[in-house]
């Protein structure tokens, strides 16, 4: 389906009520609450990694600072900006879907997915640079730059686990945004499932929020 | 006899005035309940009906329970002799790991929430379904995938770390199949999270008109509290076990000192989940007892609001006491004192509940039917388990009995004497609602007594052994401990009978049991206003709640 075939709108919007609910309001409330709760568990999942990072920092400040100086501050900062922009376009998608602007919703979601992909590409480049600078202590066959500071490896490992888990969440997010953008482009989707875009929006903003914690805890705090 | 002269159908055999708070419906000659809606295997495996999912969980956890119990029996068999000649040390380690992992992760934690919770929570608040029925089905599949995978690993390969997976033994030194077991436990954690999420959203958004928060049965309150623990604690366990996996598989050092890590950090993160997990296991049992006791005393639950608040209080305080598992691990004195005081604080909401149950029984018209016998056993054993918990929270005594059989006996009093007996009590109490059949009462009472006596015979000697200094997890012991160990093993035989009998006669009752009426116990609560078993959408029309919880009538109106 060529993109120009998507009507600009406004089209009718609404929510198809599932069997177990009595009203649309009830269903919207349940869906949003469900996502919020899921996000709270995600925050706690990451909280374990932040805790590890902070404990390592307190216990081994001399080892953590040189390791943190190896992180690519410029790439991290750029990525922060990229994610903030992607949240902006996701908000645009939600607002437009509320008004029934079908084409605008699809475009905004595509922009969101593109920005997410840019983040992942930059992150991948950063990992390559880390590899290049011998900053991968878990690779037994490759010498580690800061081998004289054993505790620094803990921080670097935590960095890989945290950013890797975040990247996994973002990859999932990009995939869902792309699939849903395709669905929104089909006729009648907004009339049946408008609230799914709002729920997805919550998830997307939350992945950004996690990065807003990862960035200071790993990149800024230890410089 | 009904007005047209036909025989009264069994479900209608109570006068309408007794079937409170509103009459059940006629299901004469028309079995349209959830069990008979469809009969294919696919209709069970692909169901989104919360009641059928509850039954699927019931079958699954019973299956896991049997494996865990067999392992326990073999452990007790091995400990009959002091020199450990029945199994090799290696086999013994694998057996107690199998027992611990299966019983904790795949029986106790999911037991009451996923079976009774799934089945009853929507009915008790007057909803047609849980908020996310397909998610509910998904969480069963996730549970089964993780649990079966881990169990296959434990049975075929074997793991020797104990259920706690302490690092660095689990990441560096154990030569057994730790990785698959960890993977399975992580997967099952997601199932818990999804169940908790479903329950919280259901309680918030699906309550029937008039069902205010303080009209909800205590069982629903405890399910809500448990769901909060699932949601707040399980993710921390997930990331902790993921870090274990990373350390074992990729040598990413976090916990192993040789790799620069901190093993005590693992204990902190592990117990941050696993102490609240104790309340995941105990709170639902308290909810079940809070339903059974008023029904069989025919009396309003004493201090309803306090019991509700106590549930939330336990769910909160339990997050602040994890450090009492590390009293002897070089914890700072300040931290140890703080954790000790906070652990004492747990006794307050627990005692509130016990006092409220006993006050409910006081001057009630008590019927000592099977569920009530289990409830009484629960209260007694929970008190012993709780009081010995205070011993362990006391720093000086913990120094003496830490990692001995005293601890083993203490937590079995809470988990087996508490949760497993509450589970059996609830199973008998709601069996007519689940299946539409009554179980044989005499056999039920015999099993309740066997369970109670067998339990005490098994675990009371372990208090003595622990106090005398027998360490837990050991395969050999000095010969002077043999008498008490043999007593404990003999008791476990009785306990096994107490489990075996219900499994047999409950299955028997499915075909031969008396048909149950909508409200065989004359109990209150929305689940007793619908037919037994309930129709596919629980109620014919949406109930409107205009009555208070546990609204048992005055004495003179009782039968």
Image: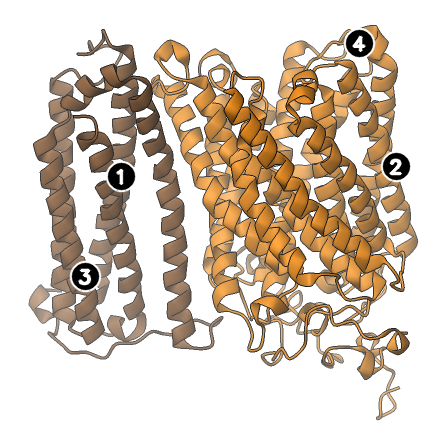
Would residue B269 appear left or right of B337 to someone viewing this image?
A: left
Q: Chain of mark 1?
A: A
Q: Which circle marks residue B453 in the picture? A: 2
Q: Looking at this view, is B308 or B9 the one in front? A: B308
Which disc number belongs to residue B82? 4
Q: Tell me, for residue A91, which label it has, or none.
A: 3
Residue B365 in sight: yes
* Residue drawn 23% across the image and 8% down it: A147
Residues indicated by labels 4 and 3 sit on the same polypeptide chain: no
Q: Colour of chain A?
A: brown
Query: How far across and down, in percent of the image, does residue A205 sit?
Result: 24, 53
The quarter of the image holding the N terminus of chain A is bottom left
Q: Residues within 10 Å of mark 2 (few under 14, many from 20)?
A: some
Q: CA distance from mark 2 to mark 1?
A: 53 Å
Which residue is more in the foreground, B156 or A165?
A165
Return the x and y of residue B103 as percentages of the image width and height.
65, 34
Q: Colour of chain B?
A: orange
Within 10 Å of disc 4 (Cα), the crowding (few <14, some 14-19, many 20+) is some
Q: Where is A29 relative to B446, above or below?
A: below
Disc 1 and disc 4 on one polypeptide chain: no
Q: Residue at x 69, y 18 (%)?
A: B472
Q: Chain of mark 4?
A: B
């Amino acid at each position: 389906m060529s993109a120009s075939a998507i009507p600009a709108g406004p089209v009718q919007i609404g929510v198809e009520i599932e069997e177990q609910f009595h009203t649309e309001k009830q269903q919207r409330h349940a869906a949003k609450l469900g996502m919020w709760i899921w996000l709270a568990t995600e925050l706690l999942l990451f909280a374990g990694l932040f805790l590890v990072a902070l404990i390592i920092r307190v216990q081994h400040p001399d080892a953590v600072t040189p390791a943190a100086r190896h992180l690519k501050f410029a790439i991290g900062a750029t990525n922060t900006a990229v994610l903030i922009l992607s949240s902006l376009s996701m908000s645009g998608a939600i607002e437009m879907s509320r008004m029934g602007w079908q084409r605008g919703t699809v475009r905004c979601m595509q922009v969101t997915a593109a920005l997410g992909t840019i983040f992942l590409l930059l992150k991948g480049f950063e990992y390559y640079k880390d590899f290049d600078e011998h900053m991968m202590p878990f690779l037994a066959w490759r010498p580690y730059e800061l081998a004289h500071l054993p505790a620094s490896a803990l921080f670097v490992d935590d960095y890989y686990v945290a950013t890797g888990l975040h990247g996994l969440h973002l990859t999932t997010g990009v995939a869902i945004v792309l699939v849903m953008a395709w669905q929104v482009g089909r006729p009648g989707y907004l009339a049946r499932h408008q609230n799914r875009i709002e729920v997805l929006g919550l998830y997307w903003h939350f992945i950004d929020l996690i990065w807003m914690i990862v960035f200071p805890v790993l990149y800024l705090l230890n410089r | 006899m009904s007005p047209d002269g036909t025989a009264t159908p069994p479900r209608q055999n109570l006068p309408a005035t007794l079937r409170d708070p509103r009459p059940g419906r006629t299901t004469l000659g028309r079995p349209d309940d959830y069990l008979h809606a469809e009969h294919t295997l696919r209709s069970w495996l692909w169901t989104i009906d919360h009641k059928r999912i509850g039954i699927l969980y019931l079958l699954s956890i019973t299956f896991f329970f049997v494996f865990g119990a067999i392992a326990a029996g073999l452990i007790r068999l091995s400990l009959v002799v002091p020199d450990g000649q029945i199994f090799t040390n290696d086999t013994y380690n694998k057996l107690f790991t199998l027992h611990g992992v299966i019983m904790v992760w795949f029986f106790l934690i999911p037991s009451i929430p996923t079976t009774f919770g799934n089945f009853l929570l929507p009915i008790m608040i007057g909803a047609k379904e849980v908020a996310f029925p397909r998610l509910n089905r998904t969480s069963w599949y996730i549970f089964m995938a993780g649990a079966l995978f881990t169990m296959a690993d434990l049975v075929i390969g074997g793991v020797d770390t104990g259920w706690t997976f302490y690092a660095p033994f689990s990441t560096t030194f154990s030569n057994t199949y730790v990785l698959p077991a960890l993977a399975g436990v992580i997967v099952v954690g997601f199932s818990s999270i999804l169940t908790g999420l479903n329950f919280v959203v259901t309680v918030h958004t699906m309550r029937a008109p008039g069902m205010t928060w303080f009209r909800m049965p205590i069982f629903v309150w405890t399910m809500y509290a448990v769901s909060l623990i699932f949601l707040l604690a399980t993710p921390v366990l997930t990331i902790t076990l993921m870090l274990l996996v990373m350390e074992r598989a990729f040598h990413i050092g976090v916990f192993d000192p040789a790799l620069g890590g901190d093993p005590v950090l693992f204990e902190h993160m592990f117990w941050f989940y696993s102490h609240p997990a104790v309340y995941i296991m105990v709170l639902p049992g308290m909810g079940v007892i809070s339903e059974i006791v008023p029904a069989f005393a025919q009396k309003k639950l004493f201090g309803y609001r306090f019991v509700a608040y106590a549930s939330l209080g336990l769910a909160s305080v339990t997050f602040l006491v994890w450090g009492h598992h590390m009293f002897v691990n070089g914890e700072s004195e300040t931290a140890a004192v703080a954790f000790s005081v906070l652990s004492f604080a747990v006794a307050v909401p627990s005692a509130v509940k016990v006092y409220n149950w006993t006050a409910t029984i006081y001057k009630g018209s008590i019927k000592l039917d099977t569920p009530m016998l289990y409830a009484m056993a629960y209260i007694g054993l929970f008190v012993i388990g709780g009081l010995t918990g205070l011993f362990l929270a006391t720093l000086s005594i913990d120094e003496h009995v830490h990692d001995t059989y005293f601890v083993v006996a203490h937590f079995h009093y809470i988990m087996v004497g508490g949760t497993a007996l509450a589970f059996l009590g609830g199973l008998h109490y709601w069996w007519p609602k689940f299946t539409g059949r009554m179980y044989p009462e005499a056999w039920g009472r015999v099993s309740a007594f066997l369970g109670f006596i067998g339990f005490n015979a098994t675990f009371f000697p372990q208090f003595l052994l622990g106090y005398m200094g027998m360490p837990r997890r050991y395969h050999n012991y000095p010969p002077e401990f043999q008498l008490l160990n043999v007593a404990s093993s003999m008791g476990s035989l009785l306990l096994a009978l107490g489990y075996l009998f219900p499994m047999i006669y409950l299955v028997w009752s499915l075909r031969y049991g008396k048909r149950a009426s909508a409200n065989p116990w004359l109990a209150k609560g929305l689940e007793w206003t619908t037919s037994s078993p309930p129709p596919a959408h629980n109620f014919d029309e949406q109930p409107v709640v205009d009555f208070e919880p546990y609204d048992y009538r005055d004495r003179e109106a009782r039968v």
